[in-house]
Structure formats: structure tokens, C-alpha cells
Amino acid sequence: MSTLQSSLLMCPLARPWTRRGNNRGLQQVLTNITYWRCSSAGDGGRFMAEIAGLGKGSTGTGRRAAVAAKHEEEGTDDEWLMYLKPAKLEVFHHLEPWAEANVVPLLKPAEVAWQPTDLLPDLASLGADGFHAACSDITARAAGLPDAHLVCLVGNMVTEEALPTYQSIPNRFEGVRDLTGSSGTAWARWIRGWSAEENRHGDVLNRYLFLSGRVDMRQVERTIHNLINSGMVMNAARSPYHGFIYVAFQERATSISHGNTARRAKEHGDMALARICGAIAADEKRHELAYTRIVGKLFKIDPDGAVRALAYMMRLRIVMPASLVTDGRDDDLFAHYAAVAQQAGIYTASDYRSVLEHLIKQWGVEELVAGELSDEGRRARDYVCALPRKIRRLEEKAHQRRKAKPTTLTPFSWIFDKPVNITMA
């Protein structure tokens, strides 16, 4: 699971008030919900964005300090903690039969799913001479990839390889997590099946890069080690409402990124890499469908809670899973990697905006009826619907800043410290 985007939106303060109702059946469950009235000065807080190179990146040390401070605050953030109330979590108990019928079937069993060996040379089936010839062909075709595209490919692979972190994320979602490690619930089986499918992505990209001969595999492996050790940043990490919104966004962004990589590989004559990235993109698209369905169901049965969770995630931040990536040398590796992706057209600020626009349309956010929403819900709806226009304005400003700035040669240890021209907006 990877994207090359990051957004940061500061959240207003909140003060609580409650509305109580009966607790009989699913609709009754949804009425016994705590609401929070957000208050802030001006237009709802200071809008800050770091989206695939939009805005200045902070230093690595400063970024890590900010992340640590934010997560210390998060433990007392009542605006999302209300989603851990029994009335909210019981929603997912009632939805389990629906998940069994509409989410779990999207998984592919190992017997029919593609495996890395299907996409790369296999010594056992090709024999020594055939295997050597196939590997030589991969190396020769990989030689035609531009360095910038190779940096993006390594970044995607490193992100995919941090799977142990990602499997732990949904297992923190209250109400759906796999409590035993082998639970038979629909939610638990989805988490394990999704993780099993994702596991192939890092495997196949890692093997391809090894065979390409174009990357410093030890530096890449150290980066993977560091990333898994560092973990990842995710707000409201225990709330299934917020968590499923986060993963729906990430899966679509990842599909776009791998799809763009496949197209660029094809343009440069590397059909093996094009097939690999195309297969991964198709997986991510299917995973996106699952998470989009889940959140879409929440919008149907609890539109107020769903839209406020979406606004919360967009205000606070949706951060790329690999935002804490480091190779041990470049403290701004994530910012440099995102800038390369922006310039290479692998994942851009426009892609980020398109993901948000798609989800707004998919979940019918603009069509939410005011009568179904609290005051906070109406404000959340209006905020989310206005956000793509704000991002577009930021894109235009960042584009002008990039035009006015000279490019700089930035070395990447992944490709033996070869420099890549980038412009930081």
C-alpha cells in the first residue's frame, strides 16, 4: 500500500454536547451517539498542505518532532474518541453479514491469484540457459528507465515492503479487529486476506529491482528496515470510521501511482515492469472498491458520523504510509521522493485532488440532506465539498513557485548516489 501524497490540515478545537436516544436495532444504535460542536476562529483554522510537493517540506528532524507531538495530543482528542462509544462500534457488529456478502468476496484465493513467480523468470521452469537469458533481458530493458522513474519505483517498493506495519493498522480498529489472530469474523478474514494479497506487491517489486542491477540493494534494504522500525503516522488510529476512510483514500492513490508507473515503463520499452505494476494497480483498485463500499455503507446508515469523520481526516491529515522513510543519509528523503514523483508524473497534486473529488462523488457527500445532519455535520459537508477548489488554488501557486525556482541536483542513495534534478515548491 503506497502513495506519494501527504496533506496537513489543522483541526479546530472542540467542545462536547450530547444527544441520546434509544438503542434497539441498527437505526436505534445510531441515535445514541455523542456529537461535538467544533469552534474555531476565522474560516475554521489554518489550512496547510503538503501534497506531492505542494508547499515546503520540513526537515526530517522537525517533521519527526511534529509527528511525535501530534500523537501525544491525539490520545485526548474527544472529536474522534466519540467514535469508540459502544453505539458507534455496534454498527460494525450489525454490518458483519453485509461485509460477508459484499466485502469478503472481493478477495482472491491463492489458487487463482497471481504470484511473483508468474511475472518474473523462474529457474525451475526455464532451466539455467532460459533463466539467464530472461534475467539478461530484464536487466537490458531496465537500463532504459530514467533515474527519476527508478527512484519512484524504489519508493513504491519500499512502501509496499512495510506490510507488517499496515496489517497492524486495521487490527487497531475497534469493532472489526482480529482479536485472536485467526478469528473467523468477516472483518478479521478480510484483514488477513487483504494483507496476504498486499504481500505479493513488495515481493515482486523487490525481485524486479534486484534483477535490474540498477539499484543499491543494501541501501534499499536498510531503508525498508528503517521504515518498518519507524512505523507510520495515522490519526484516529483506533476508529473504524476514520480508519476505513484513510485506507479507501490510500488504495485509490496507490492504484493511480502504480498505474502511472506501468504506463511510463511501457513507454520506455520495459514490458516486464509494465505487467508487474499493472497487476499491482489492479489489486489496489479491487481493494479500493472494498474500502469504498464500507465507507459508502456508513454514509447510508450514519451520514452525520461519516461526513464528520471524513472532514476530520482531511482537516487533520491524511499522511502517506512512508512519510517516516529514511535511508540513514537524507533527512528529507520523503520530501525529495515526493518532488520526484510530482515531476515525473507518477503521483501529482492533481492526482491527490482527483482522489478526493472521486470519493466525494462516490459517497454522495454533496447530496447529503441537511435534515439528516447535525450543525457539525453540515459544516463538515460544506468543508469537504469546498476542499478540492482550495487544493486546486494551492496547485496553481505551487506551480508558479516551481517555475520561479531553479532545479537542484539531489543524490539518492538508492541509485548509488546518482543525482536527480528536482524543484522544491
Image: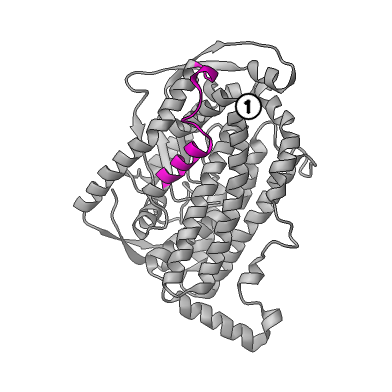
Which color mode does the image show?
one colour
Q: Main secondary structure of the magenta part?
A: helix
Tell me what residue is drawn at x 44 percent, y 22 percent. Answer: 379
Rendered image quadrant of residue 413: bottom left
Rendered image quadrant of residue 35: top right
Q: How many marks?
A: 1
Please say whether residue 58 is one of the residues in the magenta stretch.
Answer: no
Q: Which residues are magenta?
A: 352-374
Percent across and percent down for residue 2 are 52, 51
Residue 239 visible in the displayed image: no
Tell me what residue is drawn at x 61 percent, y 49 percent. Answer: 287
The amino acid sitting under disc 1 is Ile
In this view, the residue farthest toward the left is 404
Task: Classify residue 107 as left or right of residue 59.
Answer: right
Tell me what residue is drawn at x 58 percent, y 41 percent. Answer: 292
Tell me what residue is drawn at x 72 percent, y 48 percent. Answer: 105
162 or 316, which lies in front?
A: 316
Percent across and percent down for residue 29 are 69, 19
Residue 227 in the image: above or below residue 417: above
Task: Classify residue 182 as left or right of residue 416.
Answer: right
55 or 66, which lies in front?
A: 55
In this view, the residue farthest toward the bottom is 129
Q: Secondary structure at mark 1?
A: helix
Crowd around label 1: few <14 · some 14–19 · many ≥20 (10 Å): some
Residue 149 in the image: above or below residue 316: below
Residue 114 visible in the displayed image: yes
Please say whether residue 354 is one of the residues in the magenta stretch.
Answer: yes
Question: What residue would you read off at disc 1?
Answer: 301
Percent across and percent down for residue 341 are 39, 56
Percent across and percent down for residue 344 are 36, 60
